[in-house]
Amino acid sequence: MSEMPLKDLMAYMAGAAKEGAEALRLAGPEVRTKAILEAAKSIRARKDEILAANQADQAAAATKGITKAMIERLVLNDDRVEAMAKGLEEVAALPDPVGRELARWSRPNGLDIARVSTPIGVIAIIYESRPNVTADAAALCIRSANGAILRSGSEALQSALAIFAAIEDGLVAAGLPKTAIQLVPVSDRDAVGLILGGLDGAVSLIIPRGGKSLVARVQADARAPVLSHLEGLNHTYVHADAHPDKAVALTLNAKMRRVSVCGATETLLIDKAVAADLLPKIAQALVDAGCTLKGDAAAQAIFAMDAATEEDWKTEYLDTVLSVRVVDDIHQAMDHIKTYGTEHTECIITENAEAAELFLNSVDSAIVLWNASTQFADGGEFGLGAEIGIATGRMHARGPVGAEQLTTFKYQVRGTGQTRP
């Protein structure tokens, strides 16, 4: 199939995906559950070939000058392959999101009206260097009975193809067409343009998962609806009533657990009332972990660090770099977040419940946390099994996008012969 001319290949995939989506929609939830569980088994069985493919991707990436953050996202190992398999099992265990009665009411004329969840159709998912997205996206689409066309970044294509073979194993084992979920098997960049064109109406929704330039291109050029997120320019705010040990541990984890994920904290805000005492402890822990700090004048006066520029407050580093600002109070902290944030994930560290509730209710980001690391911005941690991304828009879905968020609804109206006057 990969030897076909690209336009013919994509046209074939579009038609097959529509047919596959219909098969998934009509299949019972137990069939889709079996497909996901069998795919998880196959991922474990294919571990060696998945890791070999990933080594080939890493070797190729090393010759292309790929950033350290991109390499970190690309790497697979035994633990990450097992995590992929477990993630699929968690998705399989989720309540089926299709066919749920969301609301029901009766009209004075006797009409019985129900709002019922349904699949969206064919979802095109365009992503960059994360191989695990292949497994997560496929499982979530199967769970929600959506067909899918997956397009991996070229840096992870060999890994994606190896993982995708396990997805096909699961579909076939469940008696479903393996073309219900498809992966573009070539790295030709023109494939993205064809997907953005909607493939003659076959694509119902496009989801980009990647950097700012990818998301911007999809939003600008897509001829189908787009569900996307902007950068994860996330903030951790240390309030005047923060517990010192929590402030150190949470900030360190929020930044340094994995610097390349979209839930990583990029700016630390700290109240001036506690900055002199707490900032040196937090800063030293970060520096000891290998983090470079960039601060405003007040932060620099307390702990030796580089000077932050206006551009730093607007930067999603995805690296071992953190901006630091000393703020007057919670209101200035929230103003900073409103000015520079991307409405992704924000955290307040405090023992003051009143201040926490003010922050939770006033900060209008997709995820707002109290005394918990921003690294919890993850569908798996929310109990969704996996996610395709964190949506920061305000239509259809917001926050982690799991199986439930990949459904829409229809109305079922039951009558007894009513006619409209």
Image (tube, rainbow, N blue to C red):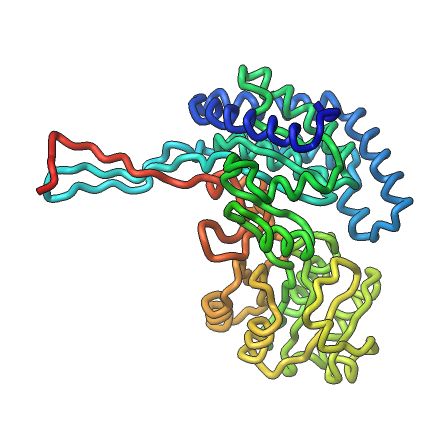
Q: Is residue 20 left or right of residue 421?
A: right
Q: Position of residue 146 (x, y in %)?
A: 50, 32
Is 392 placed above or below 192 here? below
Q: Is residue 380 visible?
A: no
Residue at the image point whose x is 70% and y is 23% from the top: 1
Q: How many marks?
A: 0
Q: Is residue 282 left or right of residue 335?
A: right
Is 156 placed above or below 363 here? above
Looking at this view, is 343 or 82 the one in front? 343
Residue at the image point whose x is 67% and y is 24% from the top: 166
Q: Is residue 338 left or right of residue 187?
A: left
Q: Quadrant of the C terminus?
A: top left
Q: Position of residue 200 (x, y in %)?
A: 53, 36
Tell me which corner region of the image, top left, top right, bottom left or bottom right, holds residue 310: bottom right
Q: Position of residue 219 (x, y in %)?
A: 58, 54
Looking at this view, is 34 or 418 the one in front? 418
Looking at this view, is 217 or 72 the one in front? 217
Residue at the image point whose x is 49% and y is 20% from the top: 31
Q: Is residue 420 visible?
A: yes
Q: Position of residue 234 (x, y in %)?
A: 63, 63
Residue at the image point whose x is 59% and y is 15% from the top: 173
